[in-house]
Amino acid sequence: MQKRLANWGNYPAITSDENAFTQEEQLREYVVANTHMIARGNGRCYGDASLGEHSISMLKYDKMLAFDVEKGIMDVQAGVTLDQILDIIVPKGWFLPVTPGTKYITVGGAVASDVHGKNHHVDGAFSGHIIDMDILTGSGETICCSASQHPDLFWATCGGMGLTGVITRVKFGLKQISTAYIRQTQLKAKNLEEVIRLFEEYKHYTYSMAWIDCLQKGDSFGRSILIVGEHATPEELSAAQQKAPLTLPAKRKLTLPFNLPSFVLNTFTVKAFNWLYYGKNYKREMHKVIPYEPFFYPLDAILHWNRGYGKAGFVQYQFVVSLEQKDGLIAILKRISDKGWGSFLAVLKVFGKQESLISFPMEGYTLALDFPIRKGLFEFLDELDEIVLQYGGRLYLSKDARMKREIFWNSYPNAGRFADIVKQYNTNARFESLQSERLSLTK
Amino acid sequence: MPTILLLGAGSDMAIAIARKFAAEKYNIQLAARAADTLIPQQQDLQVRYGVTVTTHAFDATNFTSHAAFYSGLPATPDITICVFGYLGDQEKAQQQWDETVNIINTNYTGAVSILNVVANSYADRKQGIIVGISSVAGERGRQSNYIYGSAKAGFTAYLSGLRNRLFRSGVHVMSVQPGFVNTRMTQHLTLPPLLTAQPETVALAIFKGIEKKKNVLYIKWHWRYIMLIIKLIPESIFKKLSL
């Protein structure tokens, strides 16, 4: 069926022929008969990575095949979303090994983006927890791969944006927990220097990230709140919580039913941050025990928050530079701050080491923020790209909707090898997205 | 725990119905032509809801196999839902008898054949609930799908008669008249969003309909009135319309 599709940034929006399936045979028949197609999960990547002329919707391929409660191993069809998995595993004392800032993504999407979370410096990215997975490749053949079995296919699929084929099944390990709560510490940092020092000081914490106020200049440049956390132990819970430590109280979901003018969200976040910074959080350090949901998924509480950026949509800009290139981080943040076009808040995180072929994370600083679409934005982001490249950094493909081809090829050191492996499995270049065309990965 | 039998268990609608009833702690019997294709679904229901799920080979158009299929079930189901159906291709059916037979045998004869068996069993036990998924397409024949529509019309009439017969035995029969449902069966069609239900909506409506002992269930309330209007159009005008 022809359908209007856009991912989370609402940019770009295209008309695509969408096809769903429930049986692998149906998918195989479709794959070998078509070209210009790309798998799509829940549409939570921001840009055009899962947009193509033909869209393979994975959402109905959503069966949970096995859950080993003793060992903490989940085996699922790739269209299952993380929120569905959490509902099953948390009450049994397990958690996702790695989770991004939304739980409304599919497992296939988590692999294709090789997602990272607040625990990257401790637990790495999602790919590090995969036991094995099935890929339906361009020839129609389903290949089971892992770090030791067809490793070329495995590594080109983790972070490979769906270009090696359709990820159909993923088996991965879980993390043991004894409560559904997080012991959280919030720390105020006067400026960028301080927050970077705090990251170092608190690096033994499993989870960490910081909100940066992008508008501050001078001594307060990079003013932030660092948030670190650990899974809480039963002893750390209140008496009421201890009665059912693995169950969260039910709560209502808010939704943004329509697009708002784009200034609304910024005004809202400015207020929220200032409230945290000056109001309730008057102490330098704040401790509390909170349910896992607001800790990991604060924005999921407002469904469709992306509509806050208005109809034109937005792009999220996320880059990483190595630890030695702190100057790069400062230079880019300064440019963003001077221009004043980005969202008021940015997320800063320090990645740990990661060996990979084409995944985004590498040891260093990563910064993410939103830019509402406006005239001149892409030219400005092109300038930023040049600075990122100059400092040896790169951009996250899951957020990307506009990067120039040369930037990608010059910033990802294994781009050539990745493209070669894609060619090998992507028979007749069947799998192709707007992004892969733009970056010349499939042409 | 009560048990529910789903005939035609592999469809999007059946998958949603199975999940709804499993969430309500029913054990599930899944039946479809190729039982092995039901295994992921069986595993899914067990992992998500911890209920007992069995799979069974069932061919709607192999009428003579139906009695043995039913008696071979591991437990007599408390509820039987007949979900299977075949939309077919109207134009092909006009030209090719095989396609017409397939549409009629799946949507009407096959359904009648298996439900006769189930109905007799429930009548003997003086309990049970039968749900038949028919279609609003059966309420008036239209040129775009009258072979399918006429088979569903037959099925609707059958369910109505069955309800009448089994009422005194304490067996309830519910007819479900979905309009457009967003499933694989309809994914090549462009459907009006306001009139199109999600399979999960259908599943929830069926669960609630059973609780309330509804006789005829429309999924989106608009449909009852749309079909009322369509049925009220005089034939002299209706025949000239391109519907």
Image (spheres, helix red, strand yellow):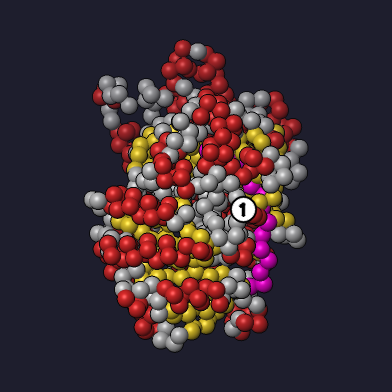
Front residue of A236/B35: it is A236
Is residue A375 placed above or below B117 in the rendered structure?
below
Does the magenta portion include A191?
no
Q: Is residue B192 left or right of residue A356?
A: left
Q: Is residue B144 left or right of residue A67?
A: left
Q: Determine whether the residue tagged by mark 1 lies in a helix, strand or loop.
A: loop
Q: Quadrant of the N terminus of chain A?
A: top left
Is residue B69 placed above or below A313 in the rendered structure?
above
Q: Is residue A257 left or right of residue A156?
A: left
Say which residue appears at 42% left-offset and 54% top-offset. A390
What main secondary structure does the magenta stretch of the protein show? strand
Front residue of B153/A268: it is A268
Front residue of A143/A2: it is A143
Does the magenta portion include A175?
yes
Q: Position of residue B111 (x, y in %)?
A: 58, 31
Q: Position of residue A8 (x, y in %)?
A: 40, 52
Residue numbers of the magenta segment:
A163-182
Is residue A38 placed above or below A97 in the rendered structure?
above
Say which residue appears at 74% left-offset and 59% top-offset. A71
Residue behind mark 1:
A355
Q: Position of residue A46 (x, y in %)?
A: 41, 51
